[in-house]
């Protein structure tokens, strides 16, 4: 997990949607556009390339999830989009601007939630939000922020006395203080209880309804399924699947498995694998393949022990990709 040196990046005022933009950059169809992004840590023999040619297009007013196992490169990618780190290669534009070169202009219009933040433990929630609001032009009133994140009854509690989930909500309230046009959230619901997670999901959907663009990272498949218009699945620094959840799932084979019978059985067309004593068959179309297999087994008088069939799901896509990680990790990607 990447450590962040500082607290949530200061958020400045987002221009109201109807007001003329003060920093009109070159127009872009995507709110966030990334091409061939590379990010390398260290140099020489110790250099490690955590991001290896990532492309992303996040449409304005949409929610885009970066999904991947630990170490896939999600945070390393997000930090460059946030302008917190320069890319080693490739191009990034946020609202048509360069997040590093045009940092001040981009920061005025974006809200960033880092994976970790540092709060002053002695301050109360109210004081923390007030302090944060002081760094933003035309901030959301503190009372409104408290309500937004369901923190009204915690307003006078010191930060150090909050639970991890409550601190996360304060963090999110800070991120949204400037009513940002583009919101970037690194694992927004990690550490939250189920109810708080759903509350954050509602909030993220509301942001989209109000026209904001959201780029978030997550490990949670249900979060990506519940929220994201588009998903990019990362593995070993690369985007290996992208599209809507439905598109990603539709492109993935269904699976039939059963204990390998003692006498060989003709199998329907598909990719056959053996996992211990199981035969695993991956097929494009589950129903005809399963029907064919069952008829063949019946005609041959074979009982298919431990028979299981499952259509593809985001979970099966993710697990298959994760299982293939070692085999697919490019040379030099491991240390
Ligand atoms: N400062 C750093 N120096 C060297 N390597 C780093 C640094 N930060 C991250 N890495 C490595 O880069 C790779 C990608 O890390 P990153 O944090 O981007 O992954 P992630 O997908 O966000 O993972 P997680 O879900 O655990 O946060 C990992 O192998 C990580 O160890």
Image (spheres, rainbow, N blue to C red):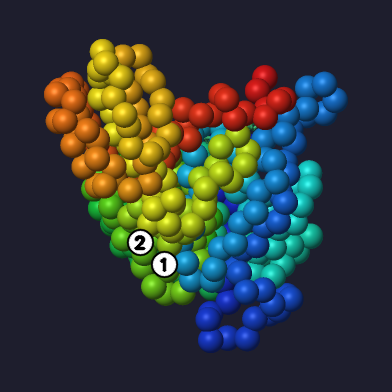
Which disc, if any, is residue 207?
A: 1
Residue 277 is situated, as x and y percent measured from the top left of the image, at 31, 14
Q: Is residue 226 visible?
A: yes
Q: Secondary structure at mark 2?
A: helix
Label disc, if present, on residue 203 of the rendered structure: 2
Residue depicted at x 69% and y 41%: 52
As displayed, is residue 335 above or below residue 106? above
Residue 187 shown left or right of residue 155 in the figure: right
How far is mark 2 from mark 1, CA to CA?
6 Å
x and y percentages locating residue 5 in the rendered image:
63, 37
Task: Identify which residue is drawn at 36% across, 68% down.
Answer: 206
Of residues 109 and 298, the one drawn nearer to the viewer in this rendering? 298
Q: Kindly tell me whether mark 1's CB lies below 8 Å from ligand 1.
A: no
Image quadrant where one finds the C terminus? top right
Residue 103 visible from this viewpoint: no
Query: Nearest the camera: 76 or 134?
Result: 76
Picture quarter with the N terminus: top right
Asked whether, in this view, residue 71 is left or right of residue 25, the answer is left
């Amino acid at each position: 997990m990447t450590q962040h040196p500082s607290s949530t990046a200061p958020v400045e005022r987002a221009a109201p949607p109807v007001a003329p933009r003060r920093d009109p950059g070159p127009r872009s169809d995507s709110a966030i556009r990334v091409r061939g992004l590379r990010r390398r840590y260290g140099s020489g023999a110790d250099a490690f390339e955590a991001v290896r040619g990532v492309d992303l297009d996040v449409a304005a007013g949409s929610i885009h999830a970066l999904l991947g196992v630990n170490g896939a490169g999600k945070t390393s990618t997000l930090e460059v989009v946030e302008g917190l780190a320069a890319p080693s290669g490739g191009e990034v534009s946020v609202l048509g601007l360069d997040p590093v070169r045009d940092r001040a202009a981009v920061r005025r219009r974006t809200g960033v939630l880092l994976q970790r933040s540092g709060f002053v433990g002695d301050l109360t929630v109210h004081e923390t939000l007030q302090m944060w609001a002081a760094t933003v032009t035309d901030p959301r009133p503190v009372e409104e922020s408290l309500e937004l994140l369901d923190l009204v009854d915690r307003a006078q509690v010191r930060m150090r006395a909050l639970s991890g989930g409550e601190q996360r909500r304060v963090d999110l309230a800070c991120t949204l203080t400037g009513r940002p046009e583009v919101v970037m959230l690194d694992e927004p619901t990690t550490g939250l209880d189920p109810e708080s997670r759903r509350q954050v999901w509602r909030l993220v959907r509301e942001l989209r309804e109000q026209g904001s663009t959201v780029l978030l990272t997550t490990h949670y498949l249900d979060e990506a399924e519940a929220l994201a218009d588009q998903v990019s699945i990362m593995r070993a620094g690369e985007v290996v699947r992208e599209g809507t959840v439905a598109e990603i799932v539709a492109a993935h084979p269904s699976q039939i498995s059963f204990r390998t019978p003692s006498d060989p059985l003709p199998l329907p067309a598909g990719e056959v694998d053996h996992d211990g004593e199981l035969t695993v068959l991956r097929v494009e179309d589950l129903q005809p393949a399963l029907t064919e297999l069952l008829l063949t087994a019946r005609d041959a008088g074979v009982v298919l022990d431990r028979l299981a069939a499952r259509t593809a799901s985001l979970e099966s896509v993710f697990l298959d990709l994760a299982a293939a990680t070692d085999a697919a990790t490019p040379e030099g990607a491991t240390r």
